[in-house]
Amino acid sequence: MNERAMVVIGAGQGGLQLAESLRSEGWTGPIRLFGEERYAPYNRPPLSKAVLAGEVGPDNLVIRGPEFFAKKGIDLVTDMRVVAIDRAARDVVLADGGRVAYEGLALATGSRARTLPLPGADLDGIVVLRTLDDALDLKRRLADARSVAVVGGGFIGLEVAASARKLGREVTVIEAVPRLMARAVSPAVSDWYAALHTGHGVRLLLSTGVTGFSGTDGRVGAVETSVGSVAADLVVVGVGVVPADDLARACGLDCDRGVVVDDCSATSDPAIVA
């Protein structure tokens, strides 16, 4: 394709909707939608429950099938990382060395799971849950786990805890603040969820800080906390996300805990939205 395209980096729900809207609102030129994952755009909410329980697989999560992209003339490129943005040339540089010229560029890169830079954090058996591959890996690990520690008492952490408990695993949730989901719900709702989870056999450690991880032979065996050691052969870290703004920062766009945009989603470069 020699014609400059509308390029969307990030094939999640946001990137997909943007590509759809471009076409439905009259853009007749090429649309290129790039995703790092090997899957077409998919629904994320089932990852922490239905996928872990084995109730649905990758094919059940797809938002739009191949026929949709063909009909709309949207070029979906999966398993392809954009490694750089050349704003002067108005090109994006792909991991395979290719370059794609853009008329307009949209960054829909979303976020990635926050990790904990603590001693022992590189031990095998410490995982996060953000992508479909993360969920499939966690599902496999849960099949062999006996005791699971979940660091973080937010939505993701509690859904993973519920799924692990449903599979019969011993589960401990470790939360740094005095109540569950403190940023999202009222104290009364926090108390209700605490009673629900403890009623299903989940151990809750509130107001408890994590200081590190320990294990043997390269595998995690415990979470070290402010109240002592919590045995676990699988640890799921669910402590929020950080913006995936590396590309934006590298090409010089204004960023401040994410890409800075105006009321119309324009970045500091008028040819790029986010």
Image (tube, grey):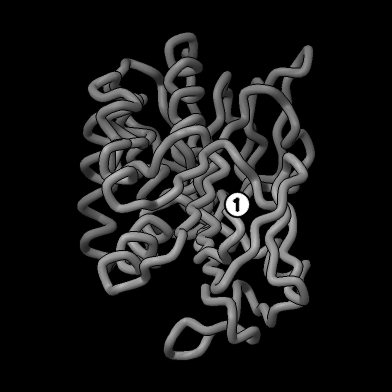
- The image shows residue 176 at horizontal and vertical percentages of 53, 55
- The image shows residue 7 at horizontal and vertical percentages of 53, 62
Q: Is 190 situated left or right of 132 in this image? A: left
Vertical arrangement, residue 228 with respect to residue 113, above or below: above
- The image shows residue 160 at horizontal and vertical percentages of 38, 35
Q: Residue 126 occupies which quadrant of the picture? A: top right
Circle 1 sits on which residue? 114
Q: Nearer the viewer, residue 144 or 19?
A: 19
Q: Nearer the viewer, residue 135 or 202?
A: 135
Residue furthest to the bottom: 263
Q: Residue at x 57, y 53 (%)?
A: 1
Q: Secondary structure at mark 1?
A: loop
Q: Is residue 180 visible?
A: no
Amino acid type shown at disc 1: Arg
Q: Is 243 situated left or right of 198 in this image? A: right
Question: Counting other residues with Cα less than 10 Å from the Cα at mark 1, is it few (<14), some (14-19), or many (20 or more)?
Answer: some
Q: Residue at x 35, y 41 (%)?
A: 42
Q: Residue at x 31, y 67 (%)?
A: 21
Q: Nearer the viewer, residue 24 or 165?
A: 24
Q: Is residue 147 visible?
A: yes
Residue furthest to the top: 144
Q: Residue at x 30, y 73 (%)?
A: 26
- The image shows residue 3 at horizontal and vertical percentages of 56, 63
Q: Is 64 situated left or right of 127 in this image? A: left
Q: Nearer the viewer, residue 250 or 164?
A: 250
